[in-house]
Image (cartoon, helix red, strand yellow):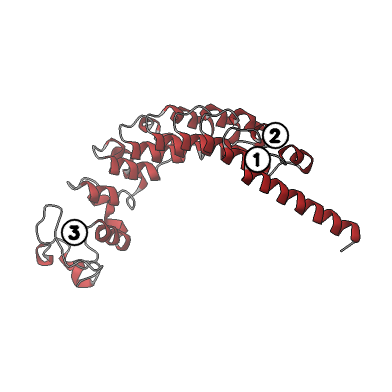
Amino acid sequence: MQGDGMTESVDWLGHPVLCHECRHEPMHREGRCRRGLSCVRDRRARRVDRFFRENGGMADGYLDHPYFEVRAIAARFCSLFRLPPLLRDPEPEVRAAAAARLPVIRLEALVHDPDRRVRVVVASKMTGRALLRFLDDPDWFVRLVTVRRLPADLLPAALHDVEPDIRRWVARRLPPAQLWRIKTDPEPTVRRCAAERATAGCLEALAHDPDIRVRYAAIERLPRRALDAFVDDDETIIRELVLRRLSDASEREDDHGTGT
């Protein structure tokens, strides 16, 4: 078994890799590339990546290679000045690799790239209000990347996204004083995220939520003065929570009074 544990050494067309037929054979003799481990002709991306890590200066010469995987990996190591043409490469992996290294000012043309992998890279590099355009992206993951990076004051723009997971992230990041906006969200898990962070007014409203998960999260955080209203709650689990919290509060008061 060779190199990285793979016995196969074939190129992207399925032909065996033969070092004596390769133009880099002198490098092989010098130990700068090794079949089955570090080889630019191998179809295994890990081996191509290792080749360029060890011979980064050669990446510029492979940006027009017919195999897209080689072009994409070479884009991680080539000169920055050679990257702009790769933004028009027919393969999304290559465009994404180039976008990951270029400054944001060069990425405007990729905002509406047809492949989500490219748009994810662009969204992960943009900041501030420039991110707002991605809230209309047709792909949920692009929008998710966006709400995880949006400034907190811009998060209300994503309050009505169709995906609950995105709205959950809004609830996790929205300033607590703004969480009242979420108390009527149709998804209970979104409201529960709000209950875990909300301030007093919103918290008391969520304590009466129709979903027991939301109510439990809210009542767990209610101030002591508001707990009495739930002592006789219809749900056993809520009554137990309230009694436990009241008991804990009483014990702390007794400890404080006796100076222990």
Kindly report the distance in space between the C-alpha atoms of the residues bearing marks 3 and 2.
Answer: 63 Å
Residue 200: x, y in percent?
72, 36
Q: Amino acid at mark 1?
A: Ala
Q: Identify the residue at image location x=24%, y=71%.
A: 31
- Of all residues, the one furthest to the right in this rendering is 258
Q: Nearer the viewer, mark 1 or mark 3?
A: 1
Residue tagged 2: 204
Residue tagged 1: 218
Is residue 121 in sight in this rendering? yes
Q: Amino acid at mark 2?
A: Glu
Secondary structure at numbered mark 2: helix
Q: Identify the residue at image location x=23%, y=51%.
A: 70
Residues packed near mark 3 inside 10 Å, few (<14), some (14 to 19) or many (20 plus): many
Name the quadrant containing residue 205: top right
Residues packed near mark 1 inside 10 Å, few (<14), some (14 to 19) or many (20 plus): many
Earlier in the chain: of badge 1 and badge 3, it is 3
> On the picture, is 76 further left or further right than 61?
right
Kindly report the distance in space between the C-alpha atoms of the residues bearing marks 2 and 1.
Answer: 7 Å
Earlier in the chain: of badge 3 and badge 2, it is 3
Q: Please tell me whether residue 109 is drawn above or below residue 32 in the rendered image.
A: above
Q: Amino acid at mark 3?
A: Asp
Residue 257: x, y in percent?
90, 57
Name the quadrant containing residue 137: top left
Name the quadrant containing residue 3: bottom left
Q: Are marks 2 and 1 in contact (CB under 8 Å)?
A: yes
Position of the C terminus, as image quadrant, is bottom right
Residue 86: x, y in percent?
29, 40
Residue tagged 3: 42
Secondary structure at numbered mark 1: helix
